Amino acid sequence: MRAGVRLGIDVGRARVGVARSDPHGMLATPVETLARREAPVESIRRLVEEYEAIEVIVGLPLSLSGAETASTDDSRAVAGELAEVLAVAVRLVDERLTTVSAARGLRDAGRTARNSRSVVDQAAAVILLQHALDLERSTGNPPGTLVEPHERRPIA
């Protein structure tokens, strides 16, 4: 397992959830929820510097069948833009059902959908990042697919 903090990013239409790992890559914890309209890429760049992250993991939302969707394109676009501006690796990791799992966990903890909006994206980012950390620990390989800077697509 590589040492170093990783950031997990759950890209949504209205909000972007951010999580971070500990320096040993063992445990993911929530950081914050960014408003999509307020330049989340710049905020993520600042968080990478603040936490001295070695890598950014962006969730790739696929349908249950594995097909790509409009949300998939959106996440790829954000990941491509991050790859252009960050000095660390950006990786895409399958995130099927992370938001559903996060919402269910918050509901089970007694939170309503209304009072969970601000944290559900963070919780989804935690689930995504923890999955990526566990995958790397079990395989010995970095998770997901590396995003090359030239893969940048405009964000819709």
Image: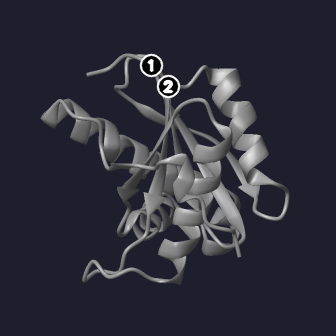
* Camera-side residue of 155 and 96: 155
Identify which residue is drawn at 75% across, 32% down. 46
Callout 1: few (<14), some (14-19), or many (20+) C-alpha neighbours within 10 Å?
some
Instruction: Give residue 4's mark.
Output: 1
Contact check, label 1 and label 2, Cβ < 8 Å: yes
Identify residue type, mark 1: Gly
Q: Is residue 120 above or below residue 126?
A: below
Location of the N terminus by quadrant is top left
SS for dot 1 = loop
Is residue 14 visible in this depiction of the protein? yes
Percent x, y for residue 49?
69, 24
Where is residue 47 shown, x and y percent of the image? 69, 32
Q: Is residue 39 left or right of residue 50?
A: right
Residue highlighted by disc 2: 54
Q: Amino acid at mark 2?
A: Ile
Which quadrant of the structure image shows residue 114?
bottom right
